[in-house]
Each structure stands twice: as structure tokens, then as C-alpha cells.
Amino acid sequence: MGAHLYVRAPLLPSSPMSAHSGRFFVLITISIIHLVNGLDSETLIEFKDSLINGQKLTTWIATNTPCNNDTANWEGLLCANGTVRGIKLERKALEGNIDTNILSRLSSLVSISFNNNNLKGVFPDFGMLDGMQEIFLSNNRFASEIPANAFKGLKWLEKLDLANNRLIGQIPASLTRLPKLKELMLQGNEFEGEIPKFVQGKLTVANFANNHFRGHIPEGLQHLPASQFAGEFRFICIVLKKYVMNEYPLTMLDVKSAAVIFAVTILSRRRHHEIPAQVLNLNTRKEGVASPHKGNKTEVSMNLTFLADDEERFDFADLLKSPAAILGSGMFGSSYQTAVAGRKVMVVKRFKQMNNVGKEEFHEHMKRLSRLRHPNIQPIVAFYYRKDEKLLVSNFADNISLAFHLHGNQSDEVQSLNWPTRLKIIKGAVRGLHNLYINLPSLIVPHGHLKSSNVLLTKNYNPLLTDYGLVPVTNQEHARDLMMAYKSPEYNQLGRISKRTDIWCLGIMILEIMTGKIPANALHQSKENDIDHTDDFISSVTEQEFDINMFDKEMTGFDKSNEGEMIKLLKIGLSCCEKDVNKRMDIKQVLERIEDVREKDGAEEDFQSTYSSEPDK
């Protein structure tokens, strides 16, 4: 009849033992549950005592059972049928180590999460927890080598997060032999050597960024975004013939084999990027060269269209043969640094979502953008048009992006930006944006995607706006999902952008520069509606007292004599973030107020003349 049909036998007077047996069975079941609860309670109390500051777990007391059926009586527990199935103690500032010998006595335990604590010491032997399915330990301080057999026997493990633990040595062999592993996060450690092959084939989600790996990316991991391997290390990535030339053969390049080899120095220190690990997929077709797979069909021209007469010319083949370095990538586009023919360093940006206009309109729009001439606007040198992808070529900026300097790991080579430099960058960015408003009056948003990763810095830290004026040529659905203008309050509230939308984007960036905080929308591209996260970002600034303590702790070059001007600049940024677009300043008002900010309180010197247009020789 059904899975939940129960038949109850009649209790006949001649069968007094039937009722007695039923009651006995219930009592046995209850006794077992109490016994398991008691054992779990003793084990958890012992684990609590093994931590240095386990007293923080105030609800873990022996007088109360850990679980009541599926309800947890102790914080951080996940219960099912009266047993402990999971432990989730995140952001508790717990100190000590994880004693897996104790936890192994929790027979039903399948998941643990100790993310964002202060756990350290010898790396735990998780092989003792043979039923484990999920282990989350990111942002702790183990700073040790993982023993070779630390994960041996975990045949059910599906998810493992060890990110940001300063772990050293090589990835242990036992980690590569987990048959059900789907998600692996190892970023932000000190791992060395080569990334090994994993027996289960492709990992669904994985991140190896910001370690010290060398060698080739295993074929089973080449489906992952390249940023998942980014950081201070070097890979030689082989782009196989089947990848580069899966549609058209390699006939125009003078290479020794069918494979194209790019020596890739991964420079990006950012996250959440979306480009293939095999590097740039450029089909190398050229006019007049016939494909052996396509009969006598003449192939399409691969010529670059140059927009400036004074620029050195090179062709598409030069780009393909040049070593490339990944500068950054995302759902909107990918950036590569390349030394063309071993001489001039250029940046190639590859876009796939620019089908909003036809070829002629695209050409005209690029020529229009090329006529922009301003010290704070990065000119487009050349472009390549094909229906399903576009390439924009520009000159390389020595100091990469503003986001890189604000949020990358600081080192001797990458110093934190001081107060005078940050003021210089903001003033230059506003001047560049003002120029876009003047010269692109027909565009509702002359920039459209203004954020710190789209502000490049020269060797003298002059800011250069990039990725400007692309809204008209970008697929509208893609623009709405990803471009900064479409994260604005007016678009989220009214469904439209305005002439003052770029001002809101500018305000977010000013707050980011001054506080060092990362706005959700500025660096993470997703199809989610991020307006609430942006509100949180702005609130995190407004809720603080306006004093010197609210500024980026990495910023130097200021003292009490600068505080008034710094607060003035911060308030300008907040004014730019005004939710009511009708109350928000226009670009002329912003420029006037920004130009009025000085390096020091009460300074009368012409600040602009001291730095604004130093040549980058």
C-alpha cells in the first residue's frame, strides 16, 4: 500500500507478552538514544577542554544533552535523530589544535567547519575520521606541513577547504586519492612543487592561487579559471592544438609543432576571475590561407585595426607568438600583457559579450573613443573585430591597476599607497571622468564600468581610466548583470541609469581608496543583485566616527595636519554615493570640490601644479 503503512497486531488476552514486548522495545530504543547522547556529550566536553580557550563554548555543559532529536542544544552542532552529525564553530576565535583522536569517537560525525579561528600547530590526522564528508578549516594558522597520510581512507570526503592557513610543503599524496572529492580550496598557503593529478578526474570547484607552485597544470584541472592558479608563481601552460585550433588549423604561424606554448607569468593577486586555465583561445586564421579541413574556403582576415597614426604597427601573428602574462580576468573581459615581437609591451583585452552593434557601428564607436586625448585616459591603440569576440589593444601601464595596489599582498616591490598618492589618483580619475563627460555627451554613462580595477597606474602613479565607453557596444543583458553602472541605486530602484550614475561609481571608488575596504560590486562580478552589499559597504563608512582611525591602516604619509582634508575628501565620496540621483552632484560640481582638497589642512599652494601631469618617461 505504501512505505508508511503500519499494521498493528491485536492484543489478545491470550498474548500478554505482546504489549510487554512492545514496551520493552521502546525502552531499549530510548536507552540507546540516551546512551549515544551521553557518549557524544562526554566526547564533546573532552574536545572542548582540549582547546586553549574552550570555555568560550558556554552552552557545552554536561548537564544538558547535545541533541534533542534534530534540534541542537549546544551551539555549533548539527543534529539528526539525536546524534551529532556536524560541528560548525566559525569566527569564535578558538585557539589550540583539532584533536581528531577525540572526534573519532563521534560515530555519526560527517561534517566539521572551523573557518576563521586561530587554530594552529601540527596538522590534524583526518584519516581517523573515516566517515567525514566535509572539512572546512580556512583562515586559521596551522603554518605546518601536511603529513603524507593525513587524508588516507577518507573515501566519502566531498569538500575540503584549507585556504589561508600558511601551510607549507607539497600537496600530500593522500589528498589526491579521494574518490569522491569535488571541491578543494588550497589558496593562500605556501605550498610548493607541482600540482599533482587527482584520481577522481576533474574537480568541480578548486582554487590553488597564491602559493608557490611550479610546472604544468594537470589536464584534469585545465577547465578551471586561470585565476584559480594566480599568484606569485610561474607556470608553463601548454595550449594544445585541439584547444587553440579546434575549429581552424594552425597555418599562419611559424611554429615547430601543432601546439602553441605560452610562457605565462601569473601576476594577478585578485580572485573570482573567469578565464580558462589553458590561457588565451585565439583562432589563428588569416586571409588567403586555406584550411585543409575546410576545403578551398578562404579564411577571414586577422588584421588589427590601428586607431593612432603615431603607434608602432604589428600584426596579429606578433600577438600570438609573444609571451603573455595574465593581468586580470572576469566575466566581462580578460587582460593579457605581452611584449610584441620582444619589443613593445602592450595589453590585450579580450571581450566576448560585445554583440550589441554590427561591425560598422563597432568600428565607428572605436574610432570615436580613439579621439579622446587626456593624461588620465588610457587610449585604445588598436582593435580586432570578429562577431563572437573582440580584442582591444592598449599600451602597458607600469604599475598595473589601482585595485592591485589597494588589495594585493604588500611587498618590497608593491608598496602601499600613501596619502599624497591616493589624493593624486583620485584627482586624476575625476579629471579623466570629466573629460569623458565633455567628449562623449551622447552617452548616458560615458564610462559605465568605473572601479578600482579599471584604473591603471603609470610608473609615476598617474591614473589612467580604462574600459570606458563600452556600454553601447556591450550586450545589454551582460551589461546589466556585470557593469558597475547597473549596480547603482537608481537602476535597482527605477530600472534605469542616468547621467549621474558614473558619479555614484566614482563615490564608491573614493571610499574604497580612502578606507582600503573592498566594495562587493567593485571587484566581484556576478549576476547577483549586489545592492544590499553596497549599502553595507557605505554604512561601514558612515557608522564610524569621522576621525583618523577610519582610514586605511596601510596608508602612510599623513598625520593630524592632514586629517581635515582627508575627511573632506571622504565626505565628497559619500556625497557622490547619494541614493537620490536628483540630489547627487554632477561631474562639474564633483570636480570643483575635489580640486579644492589639499594635501594638508590650510595649505594655500597650487596643489595641482605639484604633481598632476608629470611625464612618464
Image (cartoon, rainbow, N blue to C red):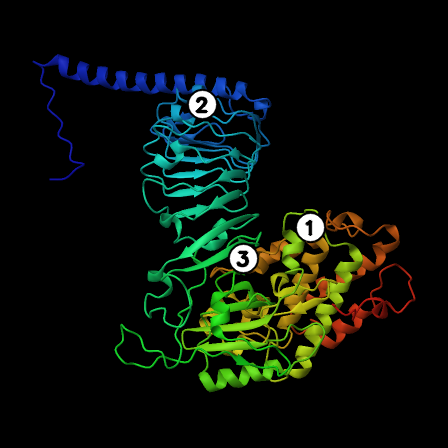
Reading the image, the residue beneath label 1 is 413
Locate residue 144, reporting x and y percent.
Answer: 54, 29
Locate residue 295, reporting x and y percent.
Answer: 25, 78
Q: Quarter of the image holding residue 301? A: bottom left
Reading the image, the residue beneath label 2 is 100
Residue at image x 73%, y 47%? 553
How far apart marks 1 and 3 lie (CA) works out to 25 Å
Q: Is mark 2 on a helix, strand or loop?
A: helix
User: Which tag, 2 or 3, sits closer to the chain's start?
Assistant: 2
Where residue 524 is drawn, which disc sits there? 3
- Examine the rendered structure and indicate whether residue 200 appears above or below residue 103: below
Q: Do the residues labelled 1 and 2 touch (CB within 8 Å)?
A: no
> Furthest-left residue in view?
14
Count residues near mark 1 (Cα–Cα under 10 Å), then give few for <14, some for 14-19, many for 20+: few
How far apart marks 2 and 3 lie (CA) works out to 36 Å
The image quadrant where one finds the N terminus is top left
Q: Which amino acid does label 3 sit on?
A: His
Q: Quarter of the image holding residue 434? A: bottom right
